[in-house]
Amino acid sequence: MKQLILALAAAATLSMGGCITSSGPGGAPPPVAKVDAARFYTGDWHEIAFRPNWATDGCVAGITRYTPKDKPTEVGVRDSCREKTLDGNEKVVEGTGYILDPPASAKIRVDYFPFISRETWVAALADDYSWFISVTPDFGEVNIFTRNPQPGEKLISELTAKVKAWGYDTSLLVFPVQPPN
């Protein structure tokens, strides 16, 4: 029975993997040259825009929380959101992030479960670390994050324009409801 459950989990993971990183239009923009890992991989980032997939179905008010670990190339990662409304049930997945390119620190792979990993790159980052845009290497996914859950329409428009200039179809993005400041 245990082997059947493991086989089903592996099959589900493989089938869901295509949903997570489906091919985008060409390659992703390169990662930024340098990220201050201690500053970046600490605290909460609000997910302002994302391309929906099986894991984010019905999500609003998404947050990625990074927590430093003992090794400088590892971070705790907690992704959460609320189901459908700000008062909805919280959906949470946790994993360990591995910085793939120290000392640049702009590429991370997060292992959530034994069979689920996700690699993302920081493709753009504000000088003051108030926002960033992440992409998957195949450019199948784009996410816009800010430290402030209410960054304002002007900044959202600027960041969306940046993503569009890279050649990404921004009509695929969802801009979920966020909590007040």
Image: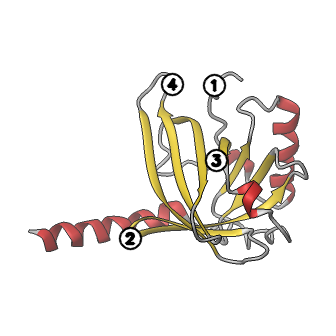
Please state, as top left, top right, bottom left or bottom right, where the C terminus lies in the image. top right
Dividing the picture into quadrants, the one containing residue 89 is top left
Q: Which residue is mark 1?
A: 179
| 144 and 172: which is toward the camera | 144
| Labels 1 & 3 near each other (Cβ < 8 A) | no
**Amino acid identity at mark 1:** Pro
Q: State how far apart marks 1 and 4 are (Cα).
A: 10 Å
Say what secondary structure mark 1 lies in: loop
**Residue shown at 71%/78% (left/top)?**
101
Q: Which residue is mark 3?
A: 50
Dot label at residue 85: 4
Q: Which residue is mark 2?
A: 115
**Residue shown at 42%/62% (left/top)?**
16
Say what secondary structure mark 2 lies in: loop
Say what secondary structure mark 3 lies in: strand
**Amino acid identity at mark 2:** Phe
User: Which one is earlier in the sequence, the residue at label 4 or at label 2?
Assistant: 4
Q: State how far apart marks 1 and 2 are (Cα).
A: 32 Å
Which percent across, then down, holds residue 162? 86, 52
**Amino acid identity at mark 3:** Phe
Q: Quick check: 166 above or below 175?
A: below
| Labels 1 & 4 near each other (Cβ < 8 A) | no
Say what secondary structure mark 4 lies in: loop
Which percent across, then down, holds residue 80? 51, 42
